[in-house]
Image (spheres, helix red, strand yellow):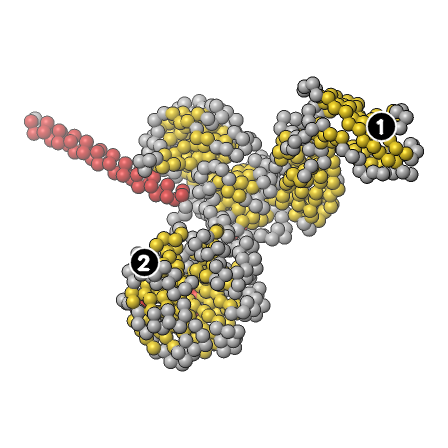
Amino acid sequence: PLNHHFREKQNKGKSMLNLKHFSVLFLLFNVIFIAAYSSLLAQPDTLKPDYRNHKNIPEYDPSLMPLNYNNKTSTGVWTELNPKVPRVDYIGIDFVDSLTGWAVGANGAIIKTKDGGNNWEVITSPVTNTLLKVNSYDGATVLITGFDGIILRSTDGGDNFTQIITGLPAGSDLWSVQMINDTLGWVCGMQSTLLKTTNGGVNWQSVNSGFNSHYWWLEFVDDNIGYIACDGGKILKTTNGGNDWTQAQAGDARALYSLDAIDTLHIIAAGASGKNAYSSDGGNTWIQNSDLIYSAVNCVAFVNADTGYAIGEDWGIRKTTDMGANWFASNVNIGEWHIKLLKERAGYIVGSGLKIYRTANGYDNWKRLINNDYFYGIHFITEMKGFTLSGRLYLTTDGGESWKETNGPAGYVLTFTDSLNGYIGTSYTTPYGHSVFTIYRSTDGGMNWFNTVITGEIDSSARIQKIFFINNNTGWAVTTRGGIIKTTDGGSNWFVQLNTYNYIIFSGIHFTDTLNGWTANANNRPMKTVNGGNTWITQQQINLSQTNDVFFTNVLNGWLIESFGLYQTTNGGLNWTKIPGVSDILRSFKLFKEEKHWFIIGGTRYETTDGGATWINITNSSPPMNSFHSPSNGIGYACGEMGLLVKYIDSAFVPVELSNFIAEMMEDKIILKWRTITETNNFGFEIEKKNAAGEWNFIGSVQGKGTTTNTHEYEFSDKTPFNGTNIYRLKQLDYDGREKFYLSNEVYFSFNMEYELYQNYPNPFNPATKIKYSLPFNSKIKLYIINILGEEIEILKNTEHERGLHEITWINNNCPSGLYLLILDAKSLENEQSFRGVRKLLLIK
């Protein structure tokens, strides 16, 4: 019995020990899973391409090319608003002057600018391989080199390219090209590839330097003297136009990827692991400087013998003023592949992730030319006004045609409940280095944001994954570390409803009313509440432990997105059926305003227009989006990686596509301008106006163009704006009676207004003249005409009138020619001020 008792205690101890081991392993698994999932949520975990070693090079991806970026058609398709160039790594750039240049990169991308990079044109490429370098001597003949011996040639300034057959084997990547004049040029690359042309790139002959290695960069200072940077730390030099080559060892044996022949004596070379070396005697001897940085230097460029710049992997721009003996940080990482400095104190840099920058005032201050942000969220308050969210907050007021950085926090989640109330889920770093999540709120349409209050015990190092409001007051948010918080006062204060202490990664939340809600969980079964979130019950009957989003149309009908599938319930979640034909990487639901038109986004994208009864794979005809929002029927906006912003429009709902609608103050009036991309059955536009607290009033109309696919500009002048806030909207009218409203930006019109009766125009007149007067207050007025005998001819106005600038037209067909007096009597309704104004009018028939 004693031995039995001992064995029983021993077995119990082992069980407790195993349970502890299990708990530790479970906790460790969750920590690892949460870290991996959070990293996955931040940005896609893809292997970085290693272009020099030809590793991890992605295959051609058509989704990275611009979508309908010229707005040629718009019905039921996606139109790219930004960046309107291939969203790829750019590796080579060249300019023939400060305005005209080209950039090339992955996916066979070629782009051209004629205005210093403010605008870029996508050039059709005959290849889809990675392109490495571009060069032109005179701006007419342009050469491009790339992977596997590719040479492209243009003779019309880089507008059209043809491929030159070189016969080079695979792996002969051509890393450098230079046209010395309009006929003489050189190309070098891997596997000892060295080619020369004497007829502008039409034909190429192989040149044997006598040194077997990879050739990374070449540069000639004239027709005869040239240098090549090679593997092994070698520099090749010719003094007779490439007939003979000599070798020099520039420091240790690490590879040299770039060089700059500043003049016939001074040369800088740099390469692997921050190596850089300098020669002051034309490349005969070299001094190796201290390593610039720990990773590769891809390009060096000097402005004189002492001062130069270097760029490379992930560490920004370095600058030297002493021939490379010392380097210091000049700028953050704005591009790591190619830096081109021009004599006009201008320069350009390109790099991975669509980095294209320009300096125009001395090489040290750089401006980003194309927005390449990783956008997480997008939301449009109206069809014209919207926000998109990345490491910055951007605003558009012209339907996405232009964007500007605006006041507001960075973050991951963006939503609005109406035109005023908006929310951003984000995080900040405390003075102690801890990351803490929070929710910011705006109550003025996104112009200003304030930090909200969150009470209760919760893991604050999590990230807000989704914010959902069922009405303007009641909403919930879920975090990536097991938290659910709720607000009942419109989002100013939040309180913790659930804290699972990291064991659940919430990925989505949806409510059908204030009581019934569901969560999607990345590492556990979904949860459900029937009391507004006071209690949450794990749905054990659902054998899905990795769901990304959840959506219900009512308490019975709902859908769950699993990472590789879509599931539907019609009985409130008791049973779920997998939808056939919907698979691959799926992320979340996105909805149009119309009830039955939805998207599923992710690595694969699907669309339904019948409320989920059927789903169509639209991956090849839609952008790879991170977020989508529809402000009205038939119109939607999406955002994604590398600056991607796109618009969806369906003319079945939107007969007229506006590309902008703005209101601008000009002297004593406000000018409304709008542009249409397409019009279908458009009768015209009615213009309506109101102040901040007033009602809409008709102020004019403009005839439409019927049906057209051409762009048309419209303009309307409001000559009597309110003194204060003016808000305008267009009512677009179809010939069949349908109508649609478009809202403009607000304009605050202010001038030192006094009572004033202005001189009529024209004067003299026959038979019509315009009369303008201003009222600084709401007033009781009488505006009338008398003759020189004092007899009253006509009363034009005799009423209470709102303050502001007013204009009327007097048409007189009955009075004889002569002198008349225009009189304005006004008495303020707000104070004791009164006014009388008199003007002489001369009628000549």
Q: Amino acid at mark 1?
A: Ile
Q: Residue furthest top?
A: 832
- 770 displayed left or right of 78: right
Residue that appears at 41% across and 32% down: 438
Residue that appears at 53% across and 74% down: 182
Using the rendered view, name the quadrant where residue 169 is placed: bottom left
Report helix, strand or loop for mark 1: strand
Report helix, strand or loop for mark 2: loop
Horizontal and vertical percent for residue 624?
49, 48
Mark-to-mark CA distance, 1 and 2: 85 Å
- 32 displayed left or right of 111: left
Horizontal and vertical percent for residue 30?
31, 38
- 821 displayed left or right of 423: right
Q: Which mark is residue 720?
A: none
Which of 191/744 is in front?
A: 744
Which of 270/597 is in front?
A: 270
Q: Residue furthest left?
A: 2
Q: Which residue is mark 2?
A: 326
Q: Is residue 775 above or below residue 681?
A: above
Residue that appears at 43% across and 30% down: 451
Q: Which residue is mark 1?
A: 785
Residue that appears at 56% across and 69% down: 140
Which of 518/248 is in front?
A: 248
Residue 615 appearing in the image:
no
Residue 373 appearing in the image:
yes
Q: Is residue 129 above or below residue 386?
A: below
Few, some or many residues within 10 Å of mark 2 (<14, 14–19, 20+): some
Horizontal and vertical percent for residue 578?
46, 40
Using the rendered view, name the quadrant where residue 740 is placed: top right
Q: Amino acid at mark 2?
A: Asn
- 650 displayed left or right of 187: right
